[in-house]
Amino acid sequence: MKGGKLIIFSAPSGSGKTTIVRHLLEQPDLNLAFSVSATSRPRRGKEKNGEHYYFMTVSEFKKHIKNDDFLEWEEVYRDNFYGTLKNEVERLWAEGKNVIFDIDVAGGLRIKKKFPKETLAVFVKPPSVDELKIRLKKEVPKVMTKSICVLRRLP
């Protein structure tokens, strides 16, 4: 597996990483394409398979794990898996694109370990926990609760 650059953005929900990634994707001179992650969680709202995520059952996800089909994967919550399929990156590299990711820190570090020379990893730090709470209150309250619990565990 060899191709262009891998640009990874990681941050807590509500930090602004998705806004940054969208802005970068609009810059044609960067030749970027977004890596769509796989997940075993149910679709939400108007999410579309292959656009927002590659949705699959828990058993399908575990089969991909067993077949070593992922660059990285993680069980975020019980039976809620997320990961980056190798064939997704291969597909984008075959199109001559640099691949941009919006994934968690652990997944980003796994990719960087596998492709140290090709990877740029960026952590977007929120202005403060208080500002993050304000931003997340505008989003889904369930996401806010989970994110704040994760933030409390950080050093």
Image (cartoon, helix red, strand yellow):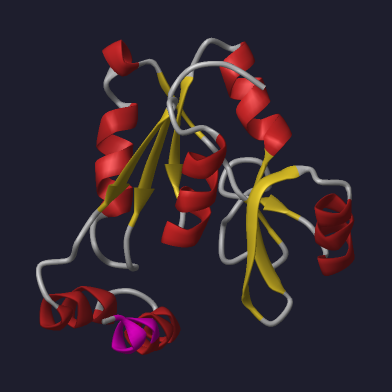
Residue 122 at x, y = what percent? 29, 46
Q: What is the magenta segment's predominant secondary structure? A: helix
Image point 88% across, 55% down: which residue? 66
Left or right of 75? Residue 3 is: left
Nearer-the-camera pick, 26 or 116: 116
Q: Is residue 99 above or below residue 154?
A: above
Q: Is residue 95 above or below residue 5?
A: above
Left or right of 73? Residue 52 is: left
Residue 87 at x, y = what percent? 72, 31
Left or right of 88? Residue 4 is: left
Q: Is residue 4 magenta?
A: no
Q: Is residue 146 above or below residue 67?
A: below
Residue 52 at x, y = what percent? 56, 48
Residue 93 at x, y = what percent? 58, 18
Q: Which residues are magenta?
A: 150-154
Which image quarter is the N terminus in?
A: top right
Image point 27% across, 21% down: which residue? 27
